[in-house]
Image: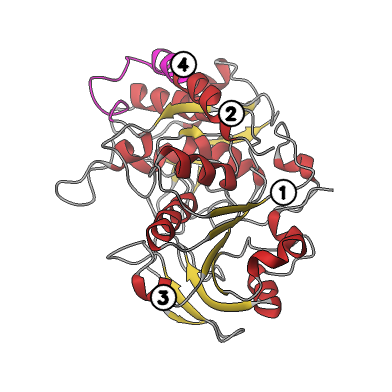
């Protein structure tokens, strides 16, 4: 039986008893019996505050939508936003309301996913304030062995890449917190309530647990797996499938030749994936209401597929063959293009990039190999 940290609360009772708790959570904060961490902490201890990441603690906020401070109807506990236009940090007012901050959100194990930075920001804020920080750890759905992609470079930090991790980093949230606390010298009073039964070579289907989508854009395990590579298309003028029932699994635009692209990609015989010609009309996001042509990525072997490499190879194939392809401009004057923030470098966009994917990926493999060796000292499992 695979247990997440929240399933082991009783064993850590003394850690929480008598303290005013602040909880950072989302709809994935559930026990094995599908009881929310909000309810569990509210019933057993003094839950004094909820801190909301992107999407809201109940999952009722749009992707990218700012979260306002409000009162949770079910518990009457105040909900403070950690996804505001001015800041994504804990304020002094929030910290004064609690004695300890607890984090329980299912991560997807990919550098672009914002929840891990909500955790790290809060950990740093608690360290400065002298408040204990607890991670109710959860399994990494992409496993703890495979590592893919380049390491984020200094100067490219943002909320889609706030720490020098590989794209697919092979660590649990508790391990990321442990690593950052040590490497940054924060000296936080950090506690990790560990998982039980999980082995590093397990992918999520191996755990026997039902998939609870961590956000609207990640409805399935296969989506989370492919997201490592296909999220890069958020920095381009192609649809990454938002506004369809297969976000991050369908890639396309009105100017793509679906059959030609599918044939080219399948001709490369990339491991563990098949490209099917796809035709779709997004109901929102890029190309809303427009008829798009492209491919749907089907994972045929969850262990063989290399999702980051697959996404990069697809990106370069489209970039090479379609003059209509472009990277999106910066959102704000003076900011970096979004592809640079996703890439953790400007190498996808500038002349520093290799002429094609193979040379780029060779460099990535060396970076991920070195990262995989250095992260092992922080393994808890």
| Badge 4 element | helix
Q: Position of residue 251 (x, y in %)?
A: 48, 39
Real-space CA distance between mark 4 and mark 3, rounded to the nearest whole angstrom: 45 Å
Q: Nearer the viewer, residue 14 or 240?
A: 14
Residue 342 placement, left or right of 5: left
Real-space CA distance between mark 4 and mark 1, rounded to the nearest whole angstrom: 30 Å
Q: Is residue 328 above or below residue 31?
A: above
Q: From which residue to which does the magenta span run?
A: 346-365
Q: Is residue 47 above or below residue 321?
A: below
Q: Residues within 10 Å of mark 1 (few under 14, many from 20)?
A: many
1 or 3: mark nearer the eye: 3
| Badge 1 element | loop
Q: Are marks 4 and 2 in contact (CB under 8 Å)?
A: no
Real-space CA distance between mark 1 and mark 2, rounded to the nearest whole angstrom: 17 Å
Q: Residue 239: in sight, yes or no?
A: yes
Residue that numbered label 1 is attached to: 195
Residue that numbered label 3 is attached to: 96
Which label was assigned to residue 366?
A: 4
| Badge 2 element | helix
Which label was assigned to residue 314?
A: none
Q: Nearer the viewer, residue 2 or 101?
A: 101
Q: Position of residue 62 (x, y in %)?
A: 45, 65
- The C terminus - image quarter: top right
Q: Position of residue 333 (x, y in %)?
A: 14, 49
């Amino acid at each position: 039986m695979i247990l997440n940290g929240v399933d082991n609360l009783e064993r850590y009772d003394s850690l929480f008893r008598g303290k005013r708790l602040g909880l950072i959570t989302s709809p994935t904060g559930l026990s094995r019996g599908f009881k929310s961490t909000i309810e569990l902490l509210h019933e057993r201890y003094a839950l004094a505050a909820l801190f909301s990441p992107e999407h809201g603690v109940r999952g009722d906020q749009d992707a990218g939508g700012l979260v306002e401070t409000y009162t949770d109807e079910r518990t009457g506990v105040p909900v403070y936003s950690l996804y505001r236009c001015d800041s994504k940090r804990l304020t002094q007012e929030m910290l004064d309301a609690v004695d300890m901050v607890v984090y329980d959100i299912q991560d997807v194990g990919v550098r672009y996913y914002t929840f891990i930075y909500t955790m790290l920001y809060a950990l740093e804020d608690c360290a400065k304030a002298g408040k204990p920080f607890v991670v109710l750890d959860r399994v990494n759905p992409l496993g703890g062995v495979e590592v893919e992609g380049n390491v984020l470079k200094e100067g490219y930090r943002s909320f889609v890449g706030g720490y020098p991790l590989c794209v697919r980093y092979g660590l649990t949230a508790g391990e990321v917190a442990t690593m950052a606390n040590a490497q940054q010298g924060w000296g936080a009073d950090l506690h990790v309530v560990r998982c039980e039964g999980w082995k590093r070579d397990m992918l999520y289907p191996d755990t026997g647990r039902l998939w609870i989508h961590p956000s609207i854009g990640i409805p399935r395990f296969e989506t989370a797996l492919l997201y490592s590579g296909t999220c890069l298309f958020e920095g381009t003028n192609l649809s990454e499938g938002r506004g369809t029932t297969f976000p991050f699994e369908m890639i396309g635009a009105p100017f793509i030749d679906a059959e030609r692209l599918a044939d080219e990609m399948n001709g490369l015989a990339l491991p563990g994936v098949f490209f099917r010609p796809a035709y779709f009309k997004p109901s929102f996001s890029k190309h809303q209401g427009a008829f798009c042509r492209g491919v749907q990525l089907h994972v045929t072997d969850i262990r063989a597929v290399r999702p980051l490499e697959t996404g990069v190879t697809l990106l370069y194939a489209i970039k090479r063959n379609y003059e209509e392809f472009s990277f999106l401009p910066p959102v704000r004057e003076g900011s970096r293009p979004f592809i640079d923030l996703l890439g953790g470098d400007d190498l996808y966009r500038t002349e520093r990039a290799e002429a094609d994917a193979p040379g780029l990926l060779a460099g990535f493999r060396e970076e991920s190999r070195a990262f995989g060796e250095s992260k092992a000292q922080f393994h808890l499992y």
